[in-house]
Image (cartoon, rainbow, N blue to C red):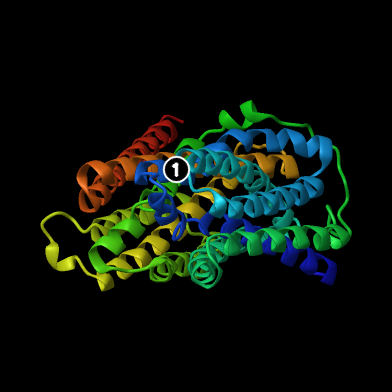
């Protein structure tokens, strides 16, 4: 990798890191602030989950915009909008009326998600463009792990800075850092690495992507991974405060167990897949591990002996392991589908595939945040986590059944030939 490509890669990774922090900073501090103003846990879940729904709605347009504005300009615009949105979210600290607080939270969070939805689909192809074909899996997983680094520092810094300077401080610091990063990156980031030759290839659209064989398993597997990550986001802080009297800072530290594990293991799974590990197996194994993690996090009704902080931390670590396997497997599996279905390997194709991955992740996260909050209000934390584990377990059985059926059909076709 040349120096120019290395610098480009670092800037793309830092942009993804800021995006990850933007997603996760509200998790340990927003729900309690909202409760103090009369906003319920379910409503907090809607605000947190709205980011994923907005990303789902905005992301499909990103692939089309790349052809018009270029991947570099979109990436910079996404980082800038994310920064502005975080700055505005910090000013919610001055709103005391519960209804107004909820409404403005929702509007600003959706605006911020507009920027976040632009950064990710452009960052993956921008990052992979900087390396050779043999290393694209590792590069993609490193870019994704930088998103994980953002989610690691987001809750920790969010809780620490909240205790240091109040609700607005972490959002203002994150927002101004993103805006400064955007201005700095605009001076140096190149859309195409040095020496790359432009060649004419046909343009593709969403229909070309959606009719690819094999994408359904990877899209659904990614959605399930997203639902696991969001299921507890609005309910974990109230649960830990009520049962263990833990403040926002301690909640952020516990969440770190999930994010750190994901961050360090995501590049490893990218390396394993580059070396021959099946993306399908990575998705299935990852979802099995996340199922076990959710059963332990609750814990399962009847296992009161596991109702303690060490068990919760262990569950967070397992959740990071499972989502690292499942989500990286899903992302690289979708990229493999674009190759096996003979789509042109261009920035537009890679952006559309990463957009589909992000859309699937956001659908799962939105549904997970909503159902996790509702089931917490209705049945409590233990049953809420167990319900998610049951859903994941059923899905893994369906995946394995579909794969077994597919292999049987291929064997019969081969014998007939």
Quarter of the figure that contains the N terminus:
bottom right
Would you identify the image quadrant in which residue 90 lies? bottom right
The count of marks equals 1
Report the front residue among 38 and 268.
38
Q: Is residue 66 left or right of residue 40?
A: right
140 sits to left or right of 35 = right
Point out residue 281 in the picture as x, y percentages from the top left corner.
41, 53
Left or right: 17 with respect to 51?
right
Horizontally, residue 111 falls left or right of residue 396, namely: right
Outermost residue on the top side: it is 207
- Give the x, y percent position of residue 98: 44, 43
Q: Residue at x 74, y 45 (%)?
A: 347
Q: Taking the image as drawn, is residue 135 in sight? A: yes
Viewer-closest of 146 and 371: 371
Residue toward you, 4 or 232: 232
Q: Depth check: give the residue in front, 172 or 10.
A: 172
Residue under the point 62% across and 56% down: 19
| Residue position for label 1 | 98
Q: Badge 1: how crowded within 10 Å, few (<14), some, or many (20+)?
A: some
Residue 84: % across, % down: 70, 51
Q: Secondary structure at mark 1?
A: helix
Residue 343's x, y, as percent? 68, 37
- Res 131 visible: no
- Outermost left residue: 302
Q: Residue at x 54, y 54 (%)?
A: 93
């Amino acid at each position: 990798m040349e120096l120019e490509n290395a610098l480009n890669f670092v800037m793309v990774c830092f942009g993804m890191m800021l995006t990850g922090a933007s997603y996760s900073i509200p998790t340990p501090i927003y729900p309690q602030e909202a409760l103090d103003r009369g906003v319920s846990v379910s409503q907090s879940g809607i605000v947190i989950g709205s980011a994923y729904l907005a990303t789902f709605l905005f992301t499909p347009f990103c692939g089309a915009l790349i052809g018009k504005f270029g991947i570099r300009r979109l990436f910079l615009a996404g980082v800038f909008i994310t920064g502005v949105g975080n700055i505005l979210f910090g000013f919610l600290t001055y709103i005391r009326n519960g209804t107004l607080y909820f409404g403005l939270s929702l509007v600003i969070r959706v605006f911020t998600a507009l920027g976040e939805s632009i950064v990710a689909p452009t960052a993956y192809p921008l990052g992979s463009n900087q390396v050779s074909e043999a290393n694209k899996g590792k590069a993609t997983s490193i870019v994704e792990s930088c998103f994980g680094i953002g989610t690691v520092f987001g809750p920790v810094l969010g809780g620490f800075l909240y205790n240091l300077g109040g609700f607005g401080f972490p959002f203002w610091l994150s927002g101004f850092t993103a805006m400064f990063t955007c201005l700095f990156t605009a001076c140096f980031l190149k859309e195409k690495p040095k020496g790359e030759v432009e060649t004419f290839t046909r343009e593709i659209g969403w229909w070309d992507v959606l009719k690819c064989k094999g994408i359904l398993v990877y899209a659904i597997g990614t959605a399930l991974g997203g639902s696991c990550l969001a299921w507890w986001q609005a309910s974990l802080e109230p649960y830990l405060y009520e049962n263990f009297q833990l403040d926002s800072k301690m909640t952020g530290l516990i969440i770190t167990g999930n994010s750190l594990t994901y961050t360090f293991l995501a590049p490893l799974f990218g390396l394993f897949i580059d070396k021959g590990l099946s993306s399908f197996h990575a998705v299935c194994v990852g979802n099995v591990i996340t199922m076990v993690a959710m059963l332990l996090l609750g814990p399962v009704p009847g296992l009161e002996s596991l109702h303690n902080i060490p068990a919760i931390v262990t569950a967070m670590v397992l959740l990071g392991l499972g989502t690292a396997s499942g989500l990286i497997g899903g992302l690289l599996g979708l990229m493999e589908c674009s190759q096996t279905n003979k789509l042109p390997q261009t920035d537009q194709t890679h952006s559309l595939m990463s957009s589909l991955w992000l859309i699937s992740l956001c659908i799962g996260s939105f549904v997970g945040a909503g159902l996790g909050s509702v089931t917490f209000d209705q049945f409590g934390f233990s049953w809420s986590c167990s319900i998610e584990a049951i859903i994941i377990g059923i899905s893994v059985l369906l995946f394995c059944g579909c794969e077994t059926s597919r292999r049987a059909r291929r064997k019969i076709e081969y014998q007939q030939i």
